[in-house]
Image (cartoon, grey):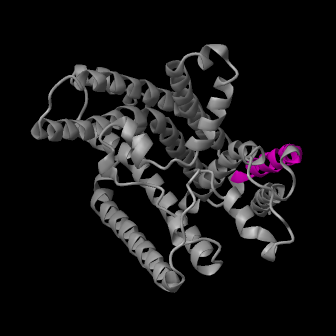
Amino acid sequence: MAAAQALLLYGQATALMMGSQYIERHQRLVLLVPVWASLGLAFKDIAHIPPFMGLNVQLGMLIIITFLYCPILLASSAKTLNINQPRWDLPAAYRRFNNPRGLPAVSLGQPEAWLRRRLQFVVFGVVKVILIVASRAVVDHILTPHLATSTIHDFSPAKEWVVRRLLFGDVSARDIFIRTYVALSWIIETYSQLTLCHIALGFVFVVILQFDEPEEWPPLFRSPLEAFTLRRFWGVFWHRLITPSATAWARSIASRLPLLRSSPTLEKLFTAFFVFTTSGLAHVLVGWRLGDKALERDLFFFWANFVAIGIEIALSRLGKRINRNPAVKLLSRMFGYAWVVGFFVLTVPHVLFPKMHYAIRAQMFARMFERTK
C-alpha cells in the first residue's frame, strides 16, 4: 500500500508540473509548494518499493532529480500551452516535463520511415538487453566461486583503507581482488540497472504510447572507452541525469554572489563543487530512507572525485606544454584507464565496505535469532 502511495504521489507531482505549462509563467511558481510536498511525501515511502533491479534507489533518485528540476521548469520562459489544441497539446507538456537532461529538440524523420525507425529502436534495445544480461551471467559464473568464501572480515573496518597497508606489505592478492570487484561492480550495477530501465521506458513511450521519437531517447551512457580520466568518466561516459538541474541551481546562486559573479574561474569551481555535492547529498538522502549506514562516506566520495578532477586539470595543463606524438598519447590513455580504475579501487570500498559489513552482520544475527526459536 505504501509503495502504491509513493507512486501515486509522484504521479500527482508529475501531473501538476505538466499542468503548469497551461498557465501563465508568473502564476506557475504557485505550484512549487504542492509539487515539492507531493515529492517529499513520495520520498518518505521509497523504502516500501521492491529492491528488484534497484527500483527503490532509482525512484528515490528520480524524486530528487524532479525536485531540483521543478523550479527550473516552472520558471521556464517557454510559451504557455493551449488546452484547446488537439489532444490538449499534451505531448508538448510531457516533453517539457520529461527532459531534465536538457536534451535539444530533434528533427523528426520522414513519415515513411516511421516504422523502420521504431523497428531499429526495438532491435537495438533488445540486443543491448541480451548483451547486458548475458555478460552479467558470464561474469557472475566466473567470479562466484572466488567470492563464495568471502566472510564478514573481508569487509571489516581494518580492510577499508589500503594505502598504508600497501606501504607495509599487508595487502594480499585476495584483498586486491575483492576491492577491485566491489569497485567495478558498483559501476556495472548502476550501468545495467539504469540502462535496462531506460530501454523499458523507451519502449513504452516510443513504441506503445508513441509520445516520442526514437531519437528523443538517446542512451544514458556513452562508451566506457571515453573514461580515460575521472573528468571524462563523469562528464562524458556517465549519465548526466542530475547534472543539468544542479548546474542551473549553482549558476543561479553564483549570480547572486558578487565574488563569484566577478570571477569566471571561481564560478566554474563553485559550479563543479555544487554539482558533486548535490550528487553526494542525493545519495545520502536515498541511503538514509533505505536504512544504509556510513552515509557520510557517500558525500566524501563525491568530494574526493572533485579534488581528484581538479588535480587532473592542473596536470593536463602542464601536459599541454609537452609535444606528444601518437605513441605517447596512446600510452597516456592507457595510464589514464589505470588511473581511473585505481582511484575507484582505492575509494569505492571505503564507501561500500561499511554498508556491506553491516548487512552481513545483520544477516548473521537474523540467522542466530532464527536458530534460537
In this rendered view, identify the residue nearer to me: 218 or 55: 218
**Is 34 in the magenta?**
yes
Q: Would you say residue 250 is visible in this rendering?
A: yes
In this rendered view, identify the residue nearer to me: 2 or 151: 2
Task: Identify the residue at image location x=63%, y=51%.
Answer: 100
Q: Position of residue 291 (x, y in %)?
A: 64, 43
Outermost residue, top side: 259
Left or right placement of residue 244 versus residue 4 in this view: left
Left or right placement of residue 37 versus residue 321 in this view: right
Q: Is residue 176 above or below residue 188?
A: above
Q: Position of residue 168 (x, y in %)?
A: 23, 19
The quadrant of the rendering that contains the N terminus is bottom right
In this rendered view, identify the residue nearer to me: 50 or 324: 324
The quadrant of the rendering that contains the C terminus is bottom right
Q: Position of residue 246 (x, y in %)?
A: 61, 37
**Is 162 in the magenta?**
no
Q: Position of residue 28 (x, y in %)?
A: 85, 48
Residue stretch rendered in magenta on the structure: 27-46
Left or right placement of residue 194 versus residue 136 in this view: right
Quarter where residue 16 is shown = bottom right
Q: Would you say residue 292 is visible in this rendering?
A: no
